[in-house]
Image (cartoon, helix red, strand yellow):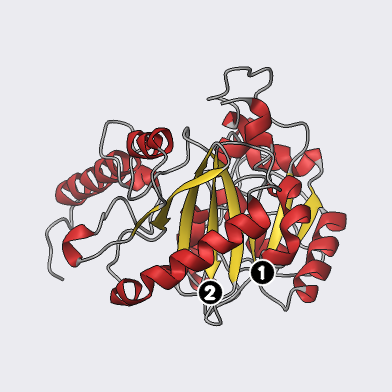
Amino acid sequence: MRTEEVNWCQIQEWYPKFKSVSIRTIIHELPESFVEYLLDDVGPFILPISVSNEDALPNRIHNPIDEEDYQVSEGSGDEAEQPVSPPSFPELELKIKESIEILGGAVFPKLNWSSPKDSAWISTSGTLCCTSFSEIALLLRSSDSLVHDLCHAYDSCSNKTMSRPPNFFLALRKWYSSLLPEMEFRCFVWGHHLVGISQREVTTFYPVLLEKKSDLQLLIENLFMDNVRLNFESENYTFDIYVTRDERVKIVDFNPWGAFTLPLLFTWEELGQNAREGNSVDFRIVESQCGIRPGLKTAVPQDYLDTSPGSGWDQFLKKVDAEFKQQGTSPTGGSDA
């Protein structure tokens, strides 16, 4: 894989060309100060000050009594830590606010290549749906997967000369609450030829796909031949699509062939063999409950799935154990009163 193949898959590169067959999107170049804010893993987790007084967690219940428990006690001299001033990005916030309004009031965010899917758990809706700059900042700042875009996008490139692109972009994509997960598919292209199609959501069996498989394949192949094959620069790549209820096919994303892209119901070896042998398009769906591939589909951070020394669970369990021991040795330990 070469760096140009990775660059062609950035949304600010491909979206203008495929705008007519994609999800409505508005793209903003991010100031370097905001990129540095996203990369800061040394200081405390602080959200930017909102010039519009918007709350990243608007549905939370404010309890003054609980909030008092989290007040830092004041020290004296060197013992007192100076509070960290939250950053502010007023120009970016106002541009994003305007774009959200243009897109109907709700969007989902994406950087050059990736969206913060791993941080959806922290939002009030449990999804990537955002209605304000503060909600977008919360998702981006909480995401580990975006570190790929920010630091490791070119790690698999044979001609790597840099660790990151010169500029980062934030794509705001119109949010559709009625999208059906079974209607999203990943398409695999080798040598400008479509060699495979896979159900995107492989953790569930959808009987409707068995009924519509032939019709769906025809729709997808037509989109590829009419709109994609001669218009996307790379010879080898993948692209994700969504089929609407009225059978329109929308391009969702482009990704490089191999590397960090998941082959889903295929292996890369199978796809390569299909390409070499010139077979017809192999369209794979989950055809029964036995065919699902559960994988790691969770709503908690990776740190809390890891129980190794130093992990989130390890630290949590040690803290709980210490608290239990302290209660057991205290004068009132074990009392039912």
Q: Residue 252 placed where, x, y %? A: 59, 59
Whether the residues at callouts 1 and 2 have beta carbons within 8 Å, the answer is: yes
Residue 111 disc label: none
In front of the other: 46 or 197: 197
**Left or right relative to 309: residue 121:** right
Residue under the point 59% across and 33% down: 42
Q: Residue 302 sits in which quadrant?
A: top left
Q: Earlier in the sequence, mark 1 or mark 2?
A: 1
Q: Residue 246 placed where, x, y %? A: 56, 82
Other-residue count near label 2 (Cα within 10 Å), few / some / many at <14 / 14–19 / ≥20: few
Residue at the spot of label 2: 60
The amino acid at mark 1 is Asp
Q: Is residue 288 above or below residue 142?
A: below
Q: Residue 31 sits in which quadrant?
A: top right
Q: Residue 52 placed where, x, y %? A: 80, 69
Residue under the point 48% across and 66% down: 218
The amino acid at mark 2 is Arg
Q: Is residue 183 above or below residue 164?
A: below
**Left or right relative to 8: residue 198:** left
Q: Residue furthest right?
A: 91
Residue at the spot of label 1: 55
**Left or right relative to 266: residue 39:** right
Q: Is residue 120 above or below residue 156?
A: below
Helix, strand or loop at disc 2?
A: loop
Q: Is residue 159 above or below residue 169?
A: above
